[in-house]
């Protein structure tokens, strides 16, 4: 099942050459979801110092200071691009109030109270008061004007869940009871603009075309009734254009459809283009990829088209869990049970709520639903590429299990990972250090990377820099797997990940050219799989996972199952060896169950051999037994964007 380029060198020479300048030949690694001290939750949870400049310096490989532990932190391998995406809601307000002492805030009633609490060592109480104030009804802005619809209605649950301060809540409710309009003291657009322009300036200072790319962006953080409907948004535009607008947030509307309309309008007015990336659909309570709109009405072609225009990719992996699939949705997928965040971030009560498991919560099911909707609406609203991102709130894009600096600031100290997300019931040891976005581009520039996101020629990993090529077409032969320049063959004979295939003459089955190469600084590869989704005769989408290339002399059984690769992890030393697995897996695979009349999608999943998990590294360092109920190893993986087939 493994082909080397030497095995088919002669065959490769017969392929018509495609010059490098004609296709994306650079693999770039980055993160499109990162928070600094200007995000409300990051600031109150202990990131008072790590700003956008810190984030970019760390991503470039420079040593920086961790905002909570104050220890030196440095990446093993630098990134190629980064988008700082602070929460747009009250962007930078706590920092400007409590650290800068901005007089536009310090002289307000709520501002004075928050300063009093912070100065008396009651930081958690200040956080509780701040979030409770956000959630009060009858809000007005600082000029006494009525609030915009949905003004931060859900952010109380988003942020309050991260701290356990019941006494503070009671005190704050009592203090606010007589004056529920106080949040207007802090909801000042000119203050938010100061923070927005600060992030713009940092992006402009650190952008080095051809070497390191920065993106100007933000996170839209709608959380109605505790459902995560967040999107990370970024633009390839420069600071001159980005200064023409303020980020659209849940202050403006909790309805993501209004975000898409705003993106369309702002593009027309300023020329700025955008991509909006859904994240943590696994925590959406059945709403992220629903077949109804925000109001619960059936999707219309208009809404489906609007969504498809702006949301071309989705986060499939990050620190708050995997959003690919679940065993409940994919019972025949033996690798579906992988790194879940098993509590909603929803602390309206002290009860701990498990997330829903519906087709609307996971990306693979969304891809299937998209096929079904395309048949009825004429457009696929869920034609999604896949990426990884960190969602780190430390300003440090950290995805190495043995060099993990935490998702939230206190996580930087291993001993604190026993505590984790208060009120939610999730210890930090229950999350993995994930993930990254990989981009195939012609050059390391804003526009080239952005274009790759738009055409979905991107993929995600849980952290390792696994090199992956994936092409689909009707002319690939087995010898193509040994091509010296696999990309030249792939682009000459087919389409790359994110692309589209249509019916071939005679209804021939498509074949797929796949090459996966290990991260030189990580583990060998276990296997390559193709995940297929298609529309069955009853109009309902189905799925199947195929093992298409693997290491060693294993053989698939009658059900297509492959024996496990083995496990070299030593739990006593948190180490492993590359004595199993392969450095490279390459194949040409043809769909043996193809029906030319059925819509379908195909994506690749690559698995490494097992390696130590961050919780095991911590337990060995602390001299303690590994945390109970958690795996000691992890099979890191990569997820390609799909290739779609349309009859």
Image (spheres, helix red, strand yellow):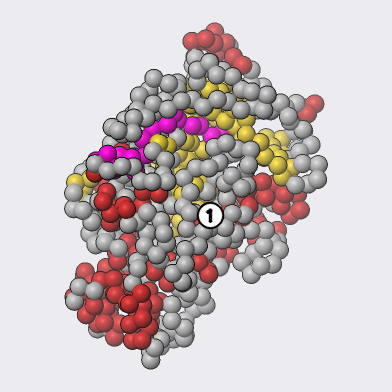
Q: Nearer the viewer, residue 168 or 369?
A: 168
Residue 396 x %, y %: 30, 49
| Image quarter (top left, top right, bottom left or bottom right) of the N terminus | top right
Total tally of numbered discs in the picture = 1
Task: Please tell me how crowded label 1 is: few (under 14), some (14-19), or many (20+) other residues with Cα within 10 Å.
Answer: many
- State the residue at coordinates (25%, 71%): 123
Q: Nearer the viewer, residue 508 or 274?
A: 508
Q: Nearer the viewer, residue 155 or 171?
A: 171
Specify the segment rendered in magenta.
602-621
- State the residue at coordinates (68%, 24%): 558
User: Up-down: is 458 above or below 149?
Assistant: above
Quarter of the view holding residue 186: bottom left
* Residue 463 visible from this viewpoint: yes
Quarter of the view holding residue 288: bottom right
* Residue 453 visible from this viewpoint: no
Q: Is residue 217 left or right of residue 361?
A: left
| Image quarter (top left, top right, bottom left or bottom right) of the C terminus | top right
User: Up-down: is 597 above or below 478?
Assistant: below
Q: Nearer the viewer, residue 194 or 526?
A: 526
SS label for mark 1? helix
Residue 490 x %, y %: 57, 25
- State the residue at coordinates (80%, 26%): 506
User: Up-down: is 415 above or below 351?
Assistant: above
Q: Residue furthest top?
A: 10
User: Up-down: is 192 above or below 472?
Assistant: below
Residue 458 x %, y %: 50, 39
Residue 217 x %, y %: 41, 56
- Check if residue 613 falls in the magenta segment: yes
- State the residue at coordinates (56%, 61%): 285
- Check if residue 500 falls in the magenta segment: no
Name the residue beneath numbered marker 1: 281
């Amino acid at each position: 099942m493994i082909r080397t380029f030497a095995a088919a060198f002669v065959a490769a020479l017969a392929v018509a050459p495609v010059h490098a300048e004609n296709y994306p030949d650079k693999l770039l690694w980055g993160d499109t979801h990162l928070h600094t001290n200007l995000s409300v939750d990051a600031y109150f949870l202990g990131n008072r110092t790590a700003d956008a400049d810190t984030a970019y310096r760390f991503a470039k490989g420079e040593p920086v200071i961790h905002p909570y532990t104050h220890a030196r932190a440095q990446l093993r391998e630098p990134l190629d691009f980064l988008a700082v995406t602070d929460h747009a809601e009250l962007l930078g307000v706590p920092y400007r109030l409590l650290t800068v002492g901005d007089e536009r805030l310090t002289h307000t009633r709520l501002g004075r109270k928050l300063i009093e609490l912070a100065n008396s060592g009651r930081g958690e109480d200040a956080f509780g008061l701040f979030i409770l104030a956000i959630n009060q009804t009858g809000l007005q802005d600082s000029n006494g004007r009525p609030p915009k619809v949905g003004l931060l209605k859900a952010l109380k649950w988003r942020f309050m869940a991260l701290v356990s301060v019941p006494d503070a809540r009671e005190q704050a409710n009592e203090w606010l009871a007589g004056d529920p309009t106080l949040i207007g003291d802090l909801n000042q657009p000119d203050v938010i603009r100061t923070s927005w322009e600060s992030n713009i300036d940092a992006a402009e200072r650190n952008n080095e075309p051809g070497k390191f790319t920065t993106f100007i962006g933000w996170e839209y953080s709608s959380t109605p009734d505790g459902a995560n409907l967040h999107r990370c948004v970024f633009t390839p535009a420069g600071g001159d254009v980005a200064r023409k607008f303020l980020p659209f947030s849940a202050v403006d509307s909790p309805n993501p459809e209004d975000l898409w309309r705003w993106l369309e309008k702002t593009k027309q007015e300023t020329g700025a283009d955008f991509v909006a990336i859904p994240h943590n659909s696994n925590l959406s309570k059945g709403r992220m990829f629903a077949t109804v709109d925000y109001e619960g009405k059936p999707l219309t072609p208009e809404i489906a088209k609007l969504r498809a225009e702006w949301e071309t990719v989705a986060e499939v992996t990050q620190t708050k869990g995997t959003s690919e699939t679940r065993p409940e949705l994919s019972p025949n997928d033996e690798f579906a049970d992988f790194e879940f965040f098993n509590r909603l971030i929803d602390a309206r009560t002290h009860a701990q709520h498990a997330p829903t498991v519906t087709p609307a919560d996971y990306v693979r099911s969304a891809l299937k639903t998209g096929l079904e909707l395309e048949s009825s609406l004429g457009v696929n609203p869920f034609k999604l590429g896949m990426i990884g991102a960190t969602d780190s709130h430390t300003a440090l894009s950290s995805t190495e299990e043995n060099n993990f600096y935490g998702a939230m600031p206190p996580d930087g100290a291993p001993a604190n990972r026993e505590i984790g997300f208060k009120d939610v019931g999730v210890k930090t040891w229950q999350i993995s250090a994930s993930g990254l976005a990989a981009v195939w581009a012609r050059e390391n520039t804003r526009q080239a990377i952005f274009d790759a996101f738009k055409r979905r020629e991107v993929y995600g990993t849980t952290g390792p820099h696994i090199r992956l090529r994936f092409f689909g077409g009707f002319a690939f032969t087995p010898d193509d797997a040994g091509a010296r320049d696999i990309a030249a063959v792939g682009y000459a004979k087919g389409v790359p990940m994110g692309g589209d295939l249509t019916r071939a003459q005679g209804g021939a089955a498509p074949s797929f050219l796949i090459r996966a190469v290990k991260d030189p600084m990580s583990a060998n590869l276990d296997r390559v799989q193709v995940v297929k989704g298609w529309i069955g005769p009853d109009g309902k989408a189905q799925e199947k996972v195929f093992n298409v290339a693997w290491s060693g002399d294993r053989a698939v059984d009658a059900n297509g199952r492959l024996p496990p690769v083995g496990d070299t992890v030593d739990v006593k030393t948190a180490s492993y060896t590359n004595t199993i697995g392969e450095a490279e897996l390459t194949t040409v695979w043809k769909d043996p169950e193809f029906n030319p009349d059925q819509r379908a999608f195909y994506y690749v999943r690559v698995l490494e051999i097992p390696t130590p998990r961050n919780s095991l590294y911590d337990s060995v360092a602390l001299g303690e037994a590994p945390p109970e109920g958690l795996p000691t190893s992890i099979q890191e993986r990569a997820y390609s964007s799909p290739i779609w087939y349309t009859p």
